[in-house]
């Protein structure tokens, strides 16, 4: 433990990740559990933290945390930093708490944008600013985030509920009743991507989604391909419309996140003859390190 200089926490809705880092920011150890904030009962976040990494905690070693742990449903609600939001602005608004035994935890704020459609993010800001100073970032997930970064600050961003809508459709709609298996079908997915791009151009998303049912009833879409087709529609619609929303038509986004999901998005970009670049897998820890250094904690 003498090597440890920082504990980096990525605590989201459905998962908990903690890393021990040395003075150079190298990862000495990683612990990952499914103890997301929604599993924590009666606000017992400190108890859950000690269950997971109690043997790491030391008053001499600061902890820094990002993700939904800083939300209203989390441990400590932090303020939103308005765009443009830089690393320095995030560091300046970190909310610090000390536990009874002296352990210090810094909770990173989220980012918001107003004017037009109000939007917010928590966790993704740390990842985005951990891996880029300029360009377009795409972090796909339950709530996909597209962000324009200029001069080391998030200038503008937009959220798409693609992943959540996919889950709702499959679990709570008539489309889901027809699904037989959710294994990825690449051909059906790419077919859906084309339908999603068409929906973005014509404003016909719900029509294209119902088409999954109609195609299946006509025996033109196998039951085990429906889920992939719907996924393709939603991702294709997102990819085709997001860049127009941000006013960027030719910028190739840096796509980072869960590897399988990144693969799917890159396939959608390719199918639509648009450029995208695969990003790093360690965006969260890079961002946590950058902010910890601004706080002189590392």
Image (tube, helix red, strand yellow):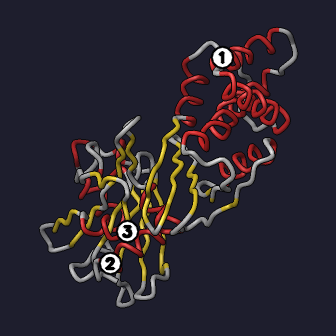
Q: Residue 87 got which mark? A: 3
- Dot 3 and dot 2 residues touching (CB under 8 Å): yes
- Kindly report which numbered mark, 2 or 1, lies closer to the viewer in this rendering: 2
**Which one is earlier in the sequence, the residue at label 3 or at label 2?**
3
Q: In the shown orientation, is residue 158 left or right of residue 4? A: right
* Mark 1 surroundings within 10 Å by alpha-carbon count, few (fewer than 14), some (14 through 19), many (20 or more): many
Q: What is the tally of numbered marks visible in this picture?
A: 3
The image position of residue 130, as x and y in percent, is 48, 68
- The image quadrant of residue 245 is top right
- Residue on which disc 2 sits: 294
The image position of residue 178, as x and y in percent, is 71, 16
**Which one is earlier in the sequence, the residue at label 1 or at label 3?**
3
Q: Residue 212 got which mark? A: none
- Residue on which disc 1 sits: 175
Callout 3: helix, strand or loop?
helix
Closer to us: 146 or 34: 146
């Amino acid at each position: 433990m003498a090597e440890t200089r920082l504990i980096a926490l990525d605590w989201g809705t459905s998962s908990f990740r903690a890393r021990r880092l040395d003075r150079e920011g190298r990862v000495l150890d990683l612990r990952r559990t499914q103890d997301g904030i929604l599993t924590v009962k009666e606000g017992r976040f400190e108890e859950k933290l000690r269950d997971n990494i109690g043997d790491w905690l030391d008053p001499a070693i600061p902890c820094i945390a990002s993700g939904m742990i800083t939300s209203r449903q989390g441990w400590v609600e932090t303020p939103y930093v308005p765009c443009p939001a830089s690393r320095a602005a995030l560091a300046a608004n970190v909310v610090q708490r000390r536990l009874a035994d002296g352990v210090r935890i810094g909770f990173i704020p989220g980012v918001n944008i107003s004017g037009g459609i109000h939007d917010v993010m928590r966790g993704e800001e740390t990842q985005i600013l951990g891996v880029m100073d300029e360009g377009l970032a795409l972090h796909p997930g339950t709530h996909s985030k597209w962000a324009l970064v200029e001069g080391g600050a998030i200038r503008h961003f937009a959220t798409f509920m693609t992943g959540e809508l996919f889950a709702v459709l499959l679990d709570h709609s008539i489309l889901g009743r027809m699904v037989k298996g959710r294994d990825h079908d690449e051909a059906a997915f790419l077919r859906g991507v084309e339908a999603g791009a068409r929906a973005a151009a014509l404003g016909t998303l719900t029509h294209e989604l119902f088409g999954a049912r109609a195609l299946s009833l006509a025996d033109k879409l196998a039951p085990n391909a429906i889920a992939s087709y719907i996924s393709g529609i939603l991702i294709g619609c997102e990819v085709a419309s997001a860049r127009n929303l941000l006013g960027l038509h030719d910028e190739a986004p840096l796509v980072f996140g869960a590897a399988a999901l990144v693969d799917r998005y890159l396939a959608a970009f390719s199918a639509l003859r648009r450029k995208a670049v695969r990003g790093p897998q360690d965006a969260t820890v890079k961002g946590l390190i950058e902010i910890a250094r601004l706080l002189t904690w590392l």
